[in-house]
Image (tube, rainbow, N blue to C red):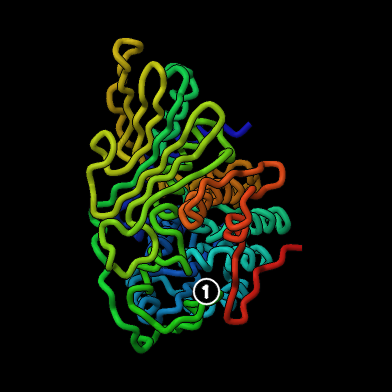
Amino acid sequence: MYNRRKFLATSSRALVGSGISFALPWESLQAKSLVSANDRIQVGVIGVNGMGWSDLRSILKIPEVVVTALCDVDENVLARRKDELAKANIQVTTYTDYRKLLDSADVDVVIIGTPDHWHCLQMVDACQAGKDVYVEKPVGNSIQECRLMSSAQVRYNRAVQCGQWQRSVPHFVDALDFIRSGKLGKIRTVKAWAYQGWMTNILQKPDSAVPAGVHYDLWLGPATSRPFNENRFHFNFRWFWDYAGGLMTDWGVHLIDYALLGMDARYPKSVMALGGKYAYPDGAHETPDTLAAVYEFDGYNMIWEQAQSISNGNYGRDHGISYIGNNGTLVLNRGGWEVIPDEKRMEAVPLQPQRGSGLDLHMINFIEAVKSRRFEQLACPIQAGAHVAEVCQMGNIAYKTNDRIHWNTESGNFAEKPANQLMEAHYHNGYNLPRVG
């Protein structure tokens, strides 16, 4: 059986001992020169403005990996990234249409760093083209898309890793071991939260002409056709339902993922959620800036909280997960984990700090699975990423219906018709939901 702890320990030592500076990934070029052409893994990136670029910088630290192609619908971003690579003597082919990148024989692996509404179509198309895929989270923008993506991986037998890199962080794995030891006693409540104080108001802006160099039709893709508006473009797409699901599917998939992992949980029995645009009622964003969702499981509840423009979350942390047991509470976030005892029922555990780069370890894990073709090695295979994305979508569906909704695990849908309708994806502009078969 694949040993996750052993992999993390071995990979962490490899990173430290490689002599490569990970602040400047281009310094790994000397190591790359020692890799034979037959062993090189050629990577193309679709979407290079945000996380796609961070993912590329990380994966390039692995000696076998070379980048051969970039794709972005904004030619301004594309030119800037091509120039940055050229300074490191890396030459790439650039595209504005991802389908042309997928046609290239010089691409073995695809990184998808586009807005959420593109993930499903691009991942399925990449698998059909025979590429292995690293897809950013959340994997899909609807429950229907998440299911299709899982099916596509099985049908085309490709390595597909979801970008939930916290699964490759050693201290997160250690915290899970402690939770499963039973020392906390019966856990009756699990909380996950994201209080993002840096997120300020998005002021209303008028529609405008499409900026020069932007292929707006390729940016919209299957989303509802609308005039160009700067508020909906690049980073802020996250706060509009056409393209994403707000903080619930942005930070929520990272944190709720560990809330589920710690409890070995699949799907809730019911979900209810309340919130709204409480901080900035007149803001341009559509998704709630404040939200509380309660997920009912057998014997315990999971609570999700989110707030923009507030930093002081639970236990003085702006994000995290807490497992509240009869004997004590384990609090976990990207900075580390600790155990706060309930009276004198157990010993306190002082802060166990973060160590290692989760993104770098996640990329090593992905490439190892690409090479071995043992997909069970993946830290976050598409099925795992799809599962937590579906659970997060449930929270947004409960918010949108303003009702308590009930899940039927056997039928795979809700008892409430309005909630079931919100499970579906709706494609526009001549695009169709991909078929797997």
Of 77 and 430, the residue lying toward us? 430
Question: For residue 203, what is the image quadrant?
Answer: bottom left
Question: Residue visible at 34% across and 84% down?
Answer: 207
Q: Is residue 33 left or right of residue 284?
A: right
- Residue 347 in percent (x, y) is at 32, 13
Which of these two is toward me, 230 or 363?
A: 230
Mark 1 neighbour density, 10 Å: few (under 14) some (14–19) many (20 or more): some
- List x then y, in percent, for residue 273: 44, 47
Q: Which residue is mark 1?
A: 223
* Quadrant (top left, top right, bottom left, bottom right) of the C terminus: bottom right
Q: Is residue 166 visible?
A: no
Using the image, determine if residue 349 lies above or below residue 284: above
Q: Secondary structure at mark 1?
A: loop
Residue 225 location (% of width, % of height): 50, 81
Q: Is residue 213 visible?
A: yes
Residue at the (56%, 29%) spot, across then down:
298
> Callout 1, which amino acid?
Ala
Q: State which quarter of the image contains the N terminus.
A: top right
